[in-house]
Image (tube, grey):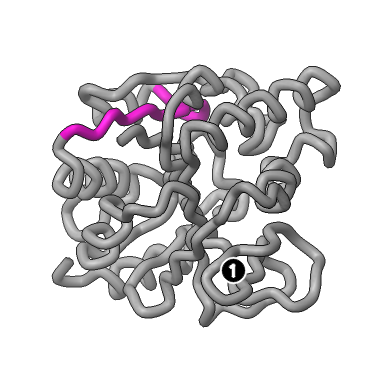
Amino acid sequence: MRYLILLAGIGRRMGSKLGGFPKCLIDIHGEPLIKRLLRQIRNNDPHADIHVVLGYKNEMILPFLDNCKIFINPFFDITCISASLWFARSSFDQPLMVIHGDVVLSSELAADLFPAEAELLIAYDSSILDPKEINIAVNGTRVTHFGVNFSGYSGAYACVFKLSADAARMFADLLDQRMRRGFNKPHTYYFSIMRKLIGNPDMEWIPFDFSRYRWKEIDHFEDIAIARVQVRGQ
């Protein structure tokens, strides 16, 4: 399986508390976050083909990325995740799982997530119900909506989605078309592309609920301590 890890961002919500240190190198029980994530992927998928998008402080992160294909988003300071996905668009020629690089997973969650058989998957947490989050809606066993500012959501998007070969190619094509009309416009946001794919009647997107596992996305400085507690002993 191919995995695309997004590590280009500055982590603005951290403010100055990390002193310019990249989030993905935060220590999680004696191991940098990115090293932990790579280990978890490879432990559960020995044939993993791992691609990584770098930007901010890429020279500090590169030494931890043995046997990974590297892409650089040189405009990391003025663009969003969609631009990082666009710079890695050549990765979308086969099935792949896209993972935000600031997510800390328990061993149990990694063991269930990375080998998951679903071809089209979106991770979410049904215990996080916040209208300010990127949310998804679930009807039975199917994801029906993905985005922001809508009612009837089922939980917060949890930093991971998986695309079949067809969906990956469609995603890359749509993203490329929109990016060529201008970076950082509402029509380029990746969740607007996900909404279009979810609306395709031939694609059945499966929700993967993180609520029964231990995990944490590190957005704010305070999240570091929470993440360490969540995966202690893992």
Along the line of sight, the residue nearer the viewer: 16 or 22: 22
Q: Which residue is at a point 46% across and 19% down the rendered structure image?
A: 71
Can residue 55 be found in the magenta stretch? yes
Along the line of sight, the residue nearer the viewer: 190 or 121: 121
Relative to residue 133, is residue 65 depicted above or below?
A: above
| Secondary-structure class at tag 1 | strand
The answer to whether residue 48 is visible is yes
Q: Is residue 23 left or right of residue 67?
A: right
Residue 134: x percent and y percent?
Answer: 66, 61
Q: Which residue is at a point 74% across and 45% down the rendered structure image?
A: 196
Local crowd at mark 1 within 10 Å, few (<14), some, or many (≥20)? many
Residue 49: x percent and y percent?
Answer: 28, 28
Residue 86: x percent and y percent?
Answer: 61, 25
Relative to residue 31, is residue 186 depicted above or below?
A: above
Query: Label 1, on which residue?
Result: 156
**What is the residue that sits farthest to the front in this orientation?**
202
Residue 35: x percent and y percent?
Answer: 24, 42
Q: Is residue 115 left or right of residue 162?
A: left
Q: Amino acid at mark 1?
A: Ala
Along the line of sight, the residue nearer the viewer: 206 or 74: 206
Quadrant location of residue 48? Answer: top left
Can residue 69 be found in the magenta stretch? no
Q: Which residue is at a point 40% across and 29% down the rendered structure image?
A: 52
Q: Which residue is at a point 85% across and 21% down the rendered structure image?
A: 181
The answer to whether residue 76 is visible is no
Q: Is residue 230 left or right of residue 194?
A: left
Q: Quadrant of the C terminus?
A: bottom left
Q: Please report the bounds of the magenta region as a residue range.
A: 47-58
Along the line of sight, the residue nearer the viewer: 177 or 100: 177
Relative to residue 130, is residue 86 depicted above or below?
A: above
